[in-house]
Structures are given as C-alpha cells and as structure tokens.
Amino acid sequence: MIKLFRLSLIIFFTLQGFSAETPESFLNKVRQNYEGINSLELKMNYSLYKSHNSLDKYSFDQSVFLMYGTNTYRTVEDFELLTSDEFNLKIDNKEQRIFISNAVPAQILDYKIDVLLTFCEKLYVQDINGEKYIELLIKDEINLPFSKIKLIVTKDYLISQMTFYYSTKMDFSKDFFSKEESLPKLVVDYTYFKKGWRDKDNILSTANYINQSNQVIAGIGKYSNYEVIDLRSN
C-alpha cells in the first residue's frame, strides 16, 4: 500500500490568480523548465505522514530520476524502473525479480496539464518571500486518490515541493487483527534539478541488467540470481 503513494514523481498544474502576470505566462515559464528536456538528473525526498495534520514522519524515502534521450531510469523504494525504445524493465530488488514489458515512452509530466485543469475545482495562490504557494482543490466527482494538493514554486519557476492530501484511507496497523486507518499526507521535496546530465556509467543501458541469448533472457551481474518475467505481448 505504502509503495503506491510514491509512484507519482512529478505533476505540474496550470496556475491561476497571479497578480503580476497572467496564468498563461506563468505556466509557460514553468513548462520551459521541464518540457522538451533531453537529459536530466532529478532527486526527490518522499515523506509520508499518517494524517493531513501530522508533523511526525511515518516513513521517508529518497528517489532519483535520470533521463538521456528517450531512455530513463528511476528508483522508487526497492524498485528500479528503466524505459528504452525496445522494452521497459521493472526491477524488484526485494523479491529479486525483473519484469520486462512492452516499451512505453516515459514522460516527466505524469499528467497532461490540460487534463488536470478539468480536475481543479478551486485554486488558491499566496506569495511568500518570492515563492508561490498554490493550493489546488480536486473536484469530488473526479476519481483521484487525493482531494487537495499544495505546491511551492520558486522565483525561478521550479517546483520545490508538492504535498498530496489523500482522500483514500490507509491502514497503518502492524497487527493483522486490528486496523489503524487514516487519511495520509505525502510530501515530495525536489532537492536537486540539473539539465544536461550524461550517462557516463551506462546506467540507462538495459544490457547492464539483463542478457538476451538464444531467446533466453537472464539477469547479469548483481541481478544474475533474479527471476526474469517477460510480460510483453506479441
């Protein structure tokens, strides 16, 4: 359950209500930092809280997103996710399994901005020390796992933090016979952003993870004992 709360890495929204510039001009400046990028290194911290108002972290994880050309690499908890032109890899280091699936192009934006506009019911903006604090309320009828999202956008039009207020309860109990359900909050801090990243160590090369020989696919190196599961459709 907890892993599902960390899969949304980067979501950006159309912003409204800025007095100094139009929403369209502000959005274009934010987009310029993230769209059309051919190489990128991005680091994130994920902090999960048991409730919307809690100040105590229930769990903490770090994530990395690397991109060069059409190939990408992500770390999410115990998982490594790779995309390539030929196929995608999902490596479960805890269960020691490698899943191969059909190639699906990765994108920095998890949702299209114009689609997210239809999800927004109300939007509030506040200026604090040169940063924009945005609160986005999601329509009740929209089938999303969260009801509210808060963003912090720097003066350089970079998103430094996103907070997701979930509308789906999560059971935090470690006892099989009891429940401890509450509405969690996930805070994503974007701690490092750099364009022009170069894959000097061939991290994005699928040949560093699996070997294909005589129609047999097997993990190599530290993945040599991993079970390989091919989910590709013909």
Image (cartoon, rainbow, N blue to C red):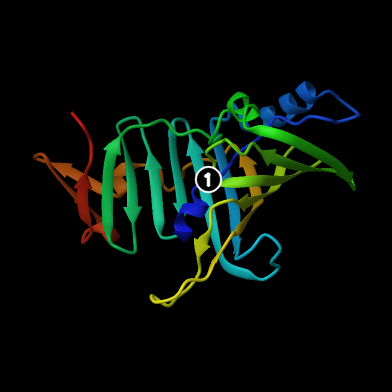
Q: Is residue 105 left or right of residue 144?
A: left
When the figure is inspected, residue 47 is found, relative to residue 89, above or below; the finding is: below
Seen at 75% across and 31% down, the residue is: 15
- Which quadrant is home to the C terminus? top left
Q: Check the image and report above or below for 38 versus 74.
A: above
Please determine whether, in this image, residue 137 is positioned above or below residue 164: above
Is residue 4 rendered to the left or right of residue 27? left
- Label 1 element class: loop
Decide if residue 22 is on the left or right side of residue 186.
right
The answer to whether residue 156 is visible is: no
Quadrant in which the N terminus appears? bottom left
Residue 21: x and y, percent? 87, 25
Whether residue 152 is visible here, answered yes or no, is yes
Give residue 88's position: percent from left, percent from top. 33, 39
Between 76 and 219, the one nearer to me in the picture: 76
Q: How many marks?
A: 1
Question: Is 25 placed left or right of 177 in the picture?
Answer: right
Query: Residue sitting at 29 percent across and 62 percent down?
Result: 95
The quadrant holding residue 27 is: top right
Toward the viewer: 85 or 2?
A: 2
Q: Residue at image x 21%, y 51%? A: 228
Residue at 88% x, 42% y is 127
> Between 137 and 30, which is closer to the camera in this rendering?
137
Query: How dense is the environment of label 1, judged by Cα within 10 Å: few (below 14), some, or many (20 and up)?
Result: few
* Residue 220 at x, y percent in the picture: 24, 54
What amino acid type should be assigned to the residue bearing mark 1?
Ser
Image-quadrant location for residue 22? top right
Residue bearing mark 1? 8
> What is the x, y in percent for residue 115?
58, 26
